[in-house]
Image (tube, helix red, strand yellow):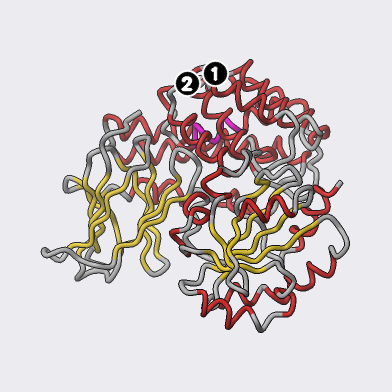
Amino acid sequence: MCLAKKITVLADAKDVDFLHVYYNDAFYDLKSYIQKEPDAAGHLILTIDPVIYPAMITCEYNGVHVFFLAFAGKEYLLKRDANKEFYVEESGANRSSVYQLLEKTSGSFRAFAYTLPRADQMTSVFKGSNHRKAIRDSILTKCNLTGPEKAFYKDWILYSSLNDKLLPFLIQNEHKYAYEQLPAAYLDSLGKYISFLNNDSLIANDKYRTAAFYFNKFLSRSALYQNNEFETQFENAQKNFTGATRQMILFKLLKDYIKSDIPDYDIFYKKFGQISQGSVYKKYIDSIYVLYRSSIPESVTACKLYNADNKETTLGDLLNLNKGKIIYIDMWASWCVPCKAEFYFSEKMIDKFKGQQVAFIFLSLDRTRENWQTSNSTYDFMKTGNSFWVNGDFSSPIAKNYNILSIPRYLLINADGKIIDADAKRPGDAALSDQIKHYLH
């Protein structure tokens, strides 16, 4: 795992008027960067750090996507060939052609991303994935790659094939999947792949990480859709995996469930801390735990607010005033059109939960109190002592602590004064009403 070196991506401003690069980092976060200003030499330059290497990177320009494998410390150049087609060059060689060729073999598998195969189809899917792997192996042989790049793609093909076989566990489905109807032959064949999934040297390979995580879900299939699905997956990861692979699976579990209402979540969070001391995964999960599961820090509760009469109060005062209630905080500003577009639904939500233990609070991030007051006075549902101007706008403690860089933004707080969701659903989203009802009972 390389932590120090970074990747540089360049493009000639004569070829493109902006450079857009994106990738999924080691923490399953989508990172996206755009450079529009060329340097003195006429190059658009982005320096990125996916944390673990090699990394699969994508350059996008006007809907055209170019994928390439990037190694730490290397420099990659987005170029056009004689046919005006984009490709990525490094050390004089085309580094994007291999992935493009491999992706062309997706065929009917691409459709499964939208239509999950039935349980009785999985034996055929299993055989089909082996056929696709054979085609990809043949393509890789013809590419004449050497060294780390060849090794990466060889493993990438193997674990892509395993991910195909894991489709019922990999693809999220709004309806319960009939795991109990999966053919015994399919389950037996899939179970043998456990021997391929404790290889920490492959942790940088995104297909390996995906396969390991969802194979653990396969091992936990009897508990899926049950109240103990999180606990079962956590325990199976501890039992069946080791080293960095186990840390990665446990990390993704904790991240995926951090907004959930699991009573023993904190117990498993502490267990993970003991297992992964000093790891990048622990540092990351600690940072989001503060946002989603801890009490609101004093630096935030001391945040100064002002009402329509210019009377000063604090966020802490508001929380104490509404103690025992579910609190929904709406961060907005008079200039924010999307914020105000949600107010129709905000008023509906206030009416819906009238007389119940729910408080709706509106906090303005306007730069001046005067701008807020002018806009605030036009909304009747903000005239009940529930609307305030935040001193400091985007530099205020609440904005800084919860990384509020754009609005609208919503916070949901439980009856104990803890953050349930630091990036809650909008008022117009029906899921918000269901979430509030859940925490009321």
Residue 366: x and y, percent? 50, 72
Residue 237: x and y, percent? 62, 22
Tell me what residue is drawn at x 65 percent, y 69 percent. Answer: 387
Q: Amino acid at mark 2?
A: Gln
Picture quadrant where residue 39 is located:
bottom left
Asked if marks 2 and 1 touch (Cβ < 8 Å), the reply is yes
Identify the residue position indicated by label 1 in the image: 274
Tell me what residue is drawn at x 67 percent, y 21 percent. Answer: 236
In terms of secondary structure, what is the magenta stretch mainly?
helix
Tell me what residue is drawn at x 64 percent, y 36 percent. Answer: 166
Tell me what residue is drawn at x 38 percent, y 53 percent. Answer: 58
How packed mark 1 is, by other alpha carbons closer than 10 Å (few <14, some 14-19, many 20 or more), is few
Q: Which stretch is magenta? A: 207-213
How packed mark 2 is, by other alpha carbons closer than 10 Å (few <14, some 14-19, many 20 or more), is few
Secondary structure at badge 1 equals: helix
Identify the residue position indicated by label 2 in the image: 277
Indicate whether 327 appears above or below 278: below
Q: Is residue 364 left or right of residue 182?
A: left
